[in-house]
Image (tube, rainbow, N blue to C red):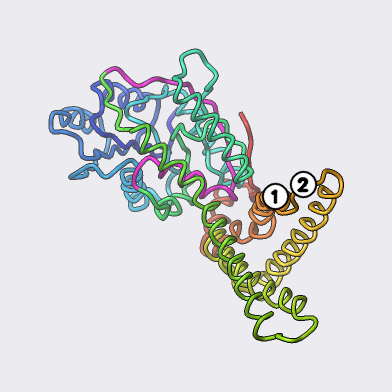
């Protein structure tokens, strides 16, 4: 069965079996295949020449720029030649060639999701519990599943496969995703966090015979983990910065502004906390969660929730520290450090999931028009909802 989805494959020094793989994809019904030669050696040019003769489009990078850059090149080609005429893009790997029938399943899911009015990211999900799974894939897959769930509240069985079905209306979004290396796929996945995912099972395949994997375990793993933790790191920096500002302002208010006033400590505490919390809110909104809405209603709603959370966090800290100190004894400072650390993580999850969540789901007016048109073309107008289905 033919599919109008466009396949994009970044390739660096692909094995000779890649030619047969492209031919098999053609026989499976994929007419449009875009291969990005990401600076391969000259001795690999015959592979690309044969792929081109099979009808695939080959785009050359003069030098190696990384998987992310190669994917963006493919997406840009798609937007120029296929936007609005296709279900979207399916990304594959040249050195880990999942069976064509699995690609067809992704294409069918991509088509059906849009026909139902959903524009979620289709994620190819491998079974990482099989006996042929490498130690790295098994261990890293487990770590990534845990991190996605803890930091983003998303349950993905296999975040590292790099096999995606990207809806037509979302391809332009993927071009804007930063990163050139392997961490790009992680950033791409995270960009769909509030839109939703549909997981489709695909076969686990080892590297092809003759493949020359460009993935460098230590540096690329570090970059992937940094991509995951970047938002949390920024959150930590803004929180610590706000705490330091709070202490400085408290000192100024108690020793200068309200000096000699019997209620100087109370007044200083309140004023310092209001100012530091306001600064923390602005930084967290803009630089951590990228909450872009500037409407008075949205700002008031998020700011109000943020200040209520801050107040509850302070109250909860005081009550828990007091209770633990009374029941178990020990150092109040040590107890407070442990309690505040736990509350720090809880606060992050609440802000991420509830306070700064709505803005990310909003579409610009042009995108809304495109989505309505796409649903009409599918013959069914259905309200799009986030999907976090599990295979």
Q: x, y percentage for residue 363?
A: 57, 60
Residue under numbered circle 2: 330
User: In the visual, does 20 lie left or right of 234?
Assistant: left
Q: Are marks 2 and 1 in contact (CB under 8 Å)?
A: yes
Q: Mark 1, residues whose alpha carbon is within 10 Å: few (<14), some, or many (≥20)?
A: few
In this rendering, the answer to whether 154 lies above or below 252 is above
Q: Residue at horizontal 75%, vertical 61%? A: 314
In this rendering, the answer to whether 382 lies above or below 210 is below
Q: Residue at horizontal 55%, vertical 19%? A: 129
Q: x, y percentage for residue 46?
A: 15, 28
Q: Secondary structure at mark 1?
A: helix
Q: x, y percentage for residue 213?
A: 30, 28
Q: Is residue 192 magenta?
A: yes
In this rendering, the answer to whether 358 lies above or below 196 is below
Residue 149 visible in this rendered orientation of the protein = yes
- Residue extending farthest to the top is 131
Q: Residue at horizontal 52%, vertical 53%? A: 233
Q: For marks 2 and 1, give the CA distance.
A: 8 Å
- Read off the magenta span: 180-209
């Amino acid at each position: 069965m033919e599919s109008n989805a466009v396949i994009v494959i970044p390739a660096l020094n692909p094995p000779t079996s890649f030619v047969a793989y492209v031919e098999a994809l053609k026989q499976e019904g994929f007419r449009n295949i875009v291969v990005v030669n990401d600076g391969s050696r000259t001795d690999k040019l015959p592979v690309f020449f044969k792929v081109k003769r099979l009808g695939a489009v080959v785009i050359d990078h003069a030098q190696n720029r990384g998987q992310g850059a190669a994917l963006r090149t493919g997406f840009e080609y798609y937007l120029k030649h296929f936007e609005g005429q296709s279900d979207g893009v399916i990304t594959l790997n040249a050195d880990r060639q999942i069976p064509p029938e699995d690609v067809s399943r992704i294409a069918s899911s991509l088509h059906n999701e849009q026909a139902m009015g959903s524009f979620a990211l289709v994620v190819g999900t491998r079974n990482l519990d099989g006996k042929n799974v490498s130690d790295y894939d098994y261990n890293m897959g487990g770590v990534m599943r845990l991190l996605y769930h803890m930091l983003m509240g998303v349950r993905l069985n296999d975040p590292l496969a790099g096999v995606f079905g990207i809806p037509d209306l979302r391809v332009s979004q993927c071009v804007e995703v930063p990163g050139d290396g392997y961490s790009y796929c992680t950033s791409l996945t995270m960009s769909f966090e509030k839109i939703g995912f549909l997981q489709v099972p695909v076969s686990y395949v080892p590297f092809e015979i003759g493949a020359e994997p460009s993935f460098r375990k230590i540096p690329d793993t570090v970059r992937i983990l940094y991509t995951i933790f970047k938002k949390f790191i920024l959150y930590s920096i803004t929180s610590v910065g706000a705490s330091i500002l709070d202490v400085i302002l408290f000192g100024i208010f108690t020793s200068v502004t309200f000096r000699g006033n019997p209620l100087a400590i109370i007044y200083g505490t309140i004023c310092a906390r209001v100012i530091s919390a306001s600064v923390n809110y602005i930084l967290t909104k803009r630089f951590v969660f990228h909450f872009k809405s500037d409407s008075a209603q949205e700002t008031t709603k998020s700011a109000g929730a943020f200040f209520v959370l801050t107040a509850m966090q302070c109250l909860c800290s005081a009550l828990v520290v007091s209770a633990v100190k009374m029941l178990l004894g020990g150092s109040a400072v040590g107890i407070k450090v442990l309690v505040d650390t736990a509350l720090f993580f809880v606060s992050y999850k609440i802000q991420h999931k509830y306070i700064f969540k709505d803005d990310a789901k909003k579409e610009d007016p042009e995108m809304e028009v495109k989505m309505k048109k796409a649903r009409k073309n599918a013959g069914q107008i259905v309200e799009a909802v986030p999907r976090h289905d599990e295979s």
